[in-house]
Image (cartoon, rainbow, N blue to C red):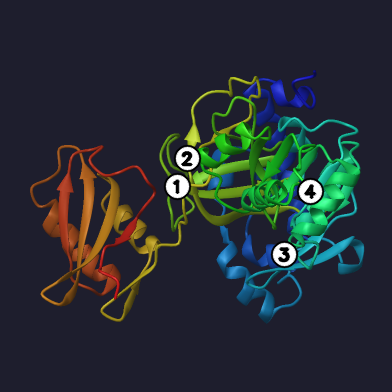
Amino acid sequence: MTEHYDELETRPAAEREADLFRRLPATVAKAMTGPGWARHLAGVDPGAVSSPAALAALPVLRKSELPARQKADPPFAGFAAEPLSSFGRLYVSPGPIFEPEGTQPDPWRVARALFAAGVRRGDIVLNTFSYHLTPGAFMMDAGARALGCPVIPAGPGQTEQQLDVIAHLRPVAYCGTPDFLKILLDAGEKAGKPAASLRKAFVSGAAFPATLRDELLGRGVAAYQAYAVADVGVVAYETPAREGLVASEDLILEIVRPGTGEPVPDGEVGEVVVTSLNPVHPVIRLALGDLSAVLAGPSPCGRTARRIKGWMGRADQTAKVKGMFVRPEQIAEILRRHPGVGRARLVVSRRNEQDAMTLHVEAANPDPDLAASMEVTLQAVTRLRGDVAVAAPGALPNDGKVIADERPVG
């Protein structure tokens, strides 16, 4: 059995990076034909955005801002480089966030990820993602058909009817959430209609713990997960190596310090930012609000694209303290004013029945007055008083948290 979808997956990492950044200036130029991108990237010379450092200097666009922007400037707040009539489908996801789909084959880059999950040409695919308004089902549908697989457009729910369809058409592969796959298998066994034809699964949209993965494998289904979003499609996908998720081709993936656009060192947890070189719908430095970290080196499966650990939580850590919002970008501003400081974490707690803040920072050979001077900066930036505690490098957890709200609930 062929192990890789094409030769792009195994090319040297340096060759891939050179190719991506050779194509990036044209992608930025294309994006800036949309008025929203033109405003967002005002003053940027697309031809100069040809290196990781140049890309990192561009502002991020936060996914969390899109609902308000699109409401003020429908339909896409100017973040589409083609007229509405040129797209094949138009979606709305919770938020609401509206997304366009191009007319090219496999516009969400799903076929490659399905192939890594063991799906092959001719496999019948049961697609249980919703076909109603959101793009999830159509992503999988287009990817499976691009791979040469017939698709059963099942959608979610209607378990009994789905079991009848499985018994009649005998699909080999499943697309959907891992939770619904377990529901189907359990219901089939209980009803005496085991879904025995299902042997492969491509899951997304919900947590996929190792315990569930192993349970499914024990029941004859090898399931692999993908990290996919409605804005750009598959960001990264699992391979038979089972060591992290491999970034999609035609996508530049960065991990940045939450609340900023500053890339963090490999291995450090931060927010996922993606740049999609989709020629029809380019996306430049979209901050997804999810946390992850880069894994060192290529995957043991032979794929050489960047790897991430997978979904590690949410980056939006805004906290309300004494009636004032404190945001990760404010902590980043404090660090910018004290360049000798490394990681930082603001802990919000209750002390004497009042909100209290302590900013924990890492610093090697700190100045004796560092804590006092940072307390002044903390108050200047947040308009709130707080303590500063200085620790040695490596003392803070590497979990991407910039603000930890430890106040009791209720």
Which tag, 3 or 2, sits closer to the chain's start?
3
**Residue 236 shows in this picture:** yes
In terms of image quadrants, where is residue 145?
Answer: top right
* Front residue (pair 240, 25): 240
User: Would you name the residue on which mark 3 appears?
Assistant: 79
Mark 4 to mark 1 CA distance (whole Å): 28 Å
Quadrant containing the N terminus in the rendered view: top right
In terms of image quadrants, where is residue 3?
Answer: top right
Q: Amino acid at mark 2?
A: Ala
- Percent position of residue 349, x then y: 21, 66
User: Would you name the residue on which mark 4 appears?
Assistant: 140
User: Would you name the residue on which mark 2 appears?
Assistant: 293
Which tag, 4 or 2, sits closer to the chain's start?
4
SS for callout 3: loop
What residue is at 43 percent from the left and 42 percent from the top? 264
- Percent position of residue 175, x then y: 74, 46
SS for callout 2: loop
Tag of residue 270: 1
* Front residue (pair 287, 203): 203
What residue is at 83 percent from the left and 43 percent from the top? 125
Mark 4 to mark 3 CA distance (whole Å): 24 Å
SS for callout 4: helix
What residue is at 55 percent from the left and 50 percent from the top? 207
Left or right of 371: which side holds 343? right
Q: Amino acid at mark 3?
A: Phe
Quadrant containing the C terminus in the rendered view: bottom left
What residue is at 78 percent from the left and 58 percent from the top? 160
Q: Residues within 10 Å of mark 4 (few under 14, many from 20)?
A: many
